[in-house]
Image (cartoon, rainbow, N blue to C red):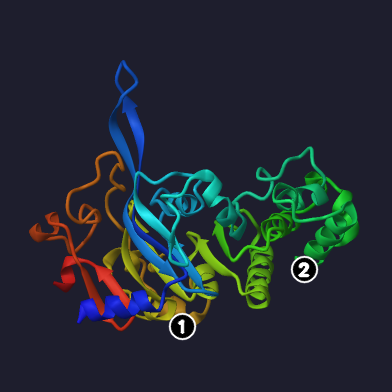
Amino acid sequence: MVDTMEKEYKENHDFLEAEGLTMHFPAKRDSLGRPVSWIHAADDVSFRVPKGKTLGVVGESGCGKSTVGKMLLNIYRPTSGKIYYEGTELTGLAPRERRPYVKRMQLVWQDPYSSLDPRLRAGDIIAEGIDNFHLAASAAQRRERVEQLMTMCGLYPEQAGNYPHQFSGGQRQRICIARALATDPEFIVCDEAVSALDVSIQAQIINLLKDLQDELSLTYLFISHDLNIVHFISDEIIVMYLGQIVERGTMEKVYQNRAHPYTKALFSATPAFTAAEKQHKTRIILEGDVPSPVDPPKGCRFRSRCPYAERRCEEEPQWHEVESGHFVKCRLFD
């Protein structure tokens, strides 16, 4: 039955696919500069992003969320694994062959200030992709496109001559979004795109992203540690712990029926807003520290902190179907 569900899952998710993505960084080198130990930033990460939908990626800091996003965009070259974009494998392409896909896949960074060159005016920042890919035939066409992008993202075209320090945090993030849209992308990685903003501004940016998605048929990989935001914007979700995915499925099914012990603990840490939520919410406090990614535990990586850990958890857990479209990697479901 699980194999059948996996087949259906694959058939319905054929826009962007990550297959067994692994990223190891050198942690220590010998006297000759050769790596002798490795940081396991991501291990055997596989998922698919549906066309025109949002896949949320959640987990604690250091779990490998941003590493996965940067591998998709070739900022990091995976140690192993494959990336497919509409059926084309990107990991085997030469830089010149991959260039057309760079135009179609963009990134919105976490910090809207440090990701903007303080020496450039807003209009020139937004036009970086236009210039790099020669998308404007004249200066007038370039200016018209920049003004269009600024209006689309809630900025005034007359602000094109201002520098980044003359904008608020929310406005700077709108500049980052406009810059990402300049190449007419189909897929955007939002890497903690609202975490540096005030709560009221976060809502505005999230609503902007949703509106742009509807208008331009965009596909998002939305990386965040804030589960309330992920719940609001995502159609599907993957939960990561120490470089591995432990649970995946549609957002509502995972939200309503949290299966993995780590997912339960993660969701219990979200703030309760209503009186009913506060009355029924129980905070799960995990004991111990997150193990080192240099020497992750064998078998289930969460077992050193899991309240349900058993001897069999020392063996690698397998994926199990909790319900249609909802999978968990845990030996509790053997």
The tag on residue 152 is 2
The answer to which image quadrant residue 307 occupies is: bottom left
| Residue picked out by circle 1 | 276
Give how far across and how far down residue 170 sits, in percent.
72, 58
Q: Is residue 176 left or right of residue 72?
A: right
Badge 2 amino acid: Met
Badge 1 amino acid: Ala
Give how far across and how far down residue 143 sits, in percent.
86, 56
Mark 2 lies on a secondary structure that is helix
Residue lying at 62% horizontally and 53% vertically, measured from the top left: 196
Please report whichever mark, 1 or 2, sits nearer to the chain's N-terminal start. Answer: 2
Residue lying at 16% horizontally and 66% vertically, measured from the top left: 331
Quarter of the N terminus within the rendering: bottom left
Report how far apart the C-alphas of labels 1 and 2 lie in the structure. 39 Å
Using the image as rendered, state which of residue 281 and residue 118 is in the foreground: 118
Question: Viewer-nearest of labels 1 and 2?
Answer: 2
Q: Is residue 13 visible?
A: yes
Q: Is residue 259 visible?
A: no
Residue lying at 32% horizontally and 27% vertically, measured from the top left: 28
Determine whether 132 is above or below 186 in the image: above
Q: How many numbered discs sit on the rendered protein?
A: 2
